[in-house]
Image (tube, rainbow, N blue to C red):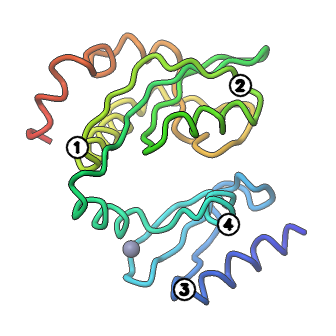
Amino acid sequence: MLKKQEDNIISICKDEGHSFVSWIYGNNSKYSKFEWLCDKGHSNKTIAKGFLKLGYRCETCNFGYFRRNSNSLDNLYLIRLDNNKECFIKIGRTFDILKRIDEFKEVGYIATVLSSVKAKHETIYKLEKKYHEVLNEYQYTPKMKFVGWTECYHKKVLTELIVVSVNNFYLNQLNKF
Ligand SMILES: [Zn+2]
């Protein structure tokens, strides 16, 4: 069955002109992450379920696509995820925040939106990238694997200036990135 997942990925890659490189985190669950090269040669790291079931593809190519569509509004969110075993912060971006919340609920978390900022995709894309760079030391590994599990943080991340100020001056600083 696990072999089948890898076979499916390799088969899709072949059909679409991409190449599978290797597994990065595990290889035995739908939330395992793998590296692959798109047909244009961009390197990507994607979770198996995202690739197979949710249609996630090359971030660089998609970024180019959305950049040309200046009306695409994107969301950067800070969500607290709770179950009876753990509580942590998920930071990410999505075009559809309600759908994203449902995905967290599906895997058993209570999802509370602490903050969300809506802006053009290009702005949000840069802001999210910056967040993950500067908040690296707060990274948290959830007990459960789900789409986005590698972008989670300890609760104390909420005291960081970049996080505290997301709705205030930070967006105005974006052109400095
Ligand atoms: Zn690409």
Residue under the point 70% across and 55% down: 32
Q: Which SS class for mark 2?
A: loop
Whether residues under marks 3 and 1 lie with C-beta atoms below 8 angstroms apart, the answer is no
Q: Residues within 10 Å of mark 1 (few under 14, many from 20)?
A: some
Q: Residues within 10 Å of mark 3 (few under 14, many from 20)?
A: few
Alpha carbons under labels 1 and 2: distance apart = 28 Å
Q: Quadrant of ligand 1?
A: bottom left
Residue under the point 18% across and 24% down: 170
- The reply, left or right, for residue 103 in relation to residue 128 is right
Dot placed on the residue nearer the N-terminal end, 3 or 4 = 3
Q: Amino acid at mark 1?
A: Thr
Circle 3 sits on which residue? 16
Alpha carbons under labels 3 and 1: distance apart = 29 Å
Whether residues under marks 2 and 4 lie with C-beta atoms below 8 angstroms apart, the answer is no
Residue under the point 68% across and 20% down: 110
Q: Position of residue 109 (x, y in %)?
A: 71, 25
Q: Amino acid at mark 4?
A: Leu
Q: Quadrant of residue 130?
A: top left
Q: Position of residue 63 (x, y in %)?
A: 32, 61
Whether residues under marks 4 and 1 lie with C-beta atoms below 8 angstroms apart, the answer is no
Dot placed on the residue nearer the N-terminal end, 1 or 2 = 2
Circle 4 sits on which residue? 52
Circle 2 sits on which residue? 109
Cβ(mark 2) to ligand 1 < 8 Å?
A: no
Most foreground residue, 100 or 170: 100
Whether residues under marks 1 and 2 lie with C-beta atoms below 8 angstroms apart, the answer is no
Q: Position of residue 93 (x, y in %)?
A: 42, 41
